[in-house]
Image (cartoon, rainbow, N blue to C red):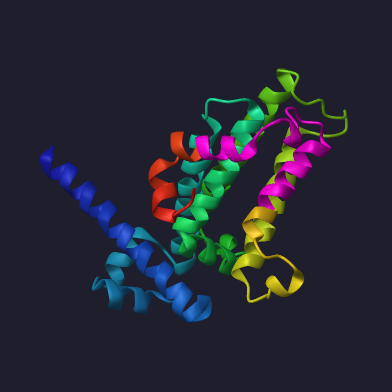
Amino acid sequence: MATSERKKREYAQRQTLIIDTARKLLLDVGYIDLNMDRIAEITEYSKGTIYQHFSCKEEILVEMLIQSAKKCGTFLGRGSRFQGTPRERMAAMALGYDLFIRLNPDHFKSKLLLQNESIRRKASPVFQKNLEKAEQDNMGIVSEVLREAVEQGHVQLRKDVTTEEVSFGLWTGAFGAYVLMFSEMNLQALGISDPRKAVWNNIHALLDGFGWHPLFQDLNWDQTKSRILKEVFPHEAKLAQVS
């Protein structure tokens, strides 16, 4: 039993090293020049050993996305359990998403480089399914809080609007903003001096637009934000120097 557990642990450690190495190579040389030979050379494992874990580089990259999605999901999940109204919990998830990106910029950058459907298709169906599930789980965390808000009467959606559509709008708005933050676009020149503040305000403007109570003007959100950071993300806020 001890030998079996040790082998499982060594296998997991080896796989983590392979993925971490691939992520660094992806950011350094790009998708085209990333290959199994380079991964094997840096990890000092044989190509045969690498292939025991993954059948092609695309499977490594898809597993990389899976792990990033799961890591992001831990931040969203913690935010969703904040002791507050559904809207305050939604705000906590927004702060969690921001902290995830601040503390894991390589995860976000690598995700941007892998927004190509052909990469997913080259991975086996198992990897594709696992990635789809990880992404759906994250969307589900957000949608669940919204469903609770509807059930509790904090927000009334039109009959032609689903909770998933609202979640999608929140996700695409935030994701798109961070894409621009990581680009070379001069946001200062566009009058955006604090893009993260703009994301925060835009999220609340969208929630206000759906009539989600309490409205932005009805709460001291600076106080709520401080409480979220203190109660939910104290360690992460300290590391990111966010207050």
The residue at 39%/53% (across/down) is 239
Q: Which residues are magenta?
A: 199-227
Q: Where residue 94 appears, x then y in whole percent?
A: 60, 44
Residue 44 makes an appearance in the image: yes
Q: Where residue 209 appears, x then y in whole percent?
A: 83, 38
Q: Where residue 131 appears, x then y in whole percent?
A: 53, 50
The one nearer the camera, 105 or 40, is 105
The residue at 62%/41% (across/down) is 139
Return the residue found at the far top.
Answer: 152
Quadrant of the image containing the N terminus = top left
Asked whether 237 falls inside the magenta stretch, the response is no
Quadrant in the rendering for residue 84: top right
Quadrant in the rendering for residue 162: top right
- Image height of 134 relative to 120, above or below: above
- Image height of 228 relative to 191, above or below: above
- Image height of 37 relative to 193, above or below: below
Q: Where residue 92 appears, x then y in whole percent?
A: 57, 38
The residue at 26%/55% (across/down) is 13
**Direction from residue 19 to residue 132 in the image, left or right:** right
**Direction from residue 33 to residue 165 in the image, left or right:** right
**Direction from residue 85 to residue 203 in the image, left or right:** right
Residue 92 makes an appearance in the image: no
Main secondary-structure element of the magenta-colored stretch:
helix
Asked whether 217 falls inside the magenta stretch, the response is yes
The one nearer the camera, 81 or 3, is 81
Count of labels shown? Answer: 0
The residue at 57%/36% (across/down) is 223
**Direction from residue 163 to residue 70 in the image, left or right:** left
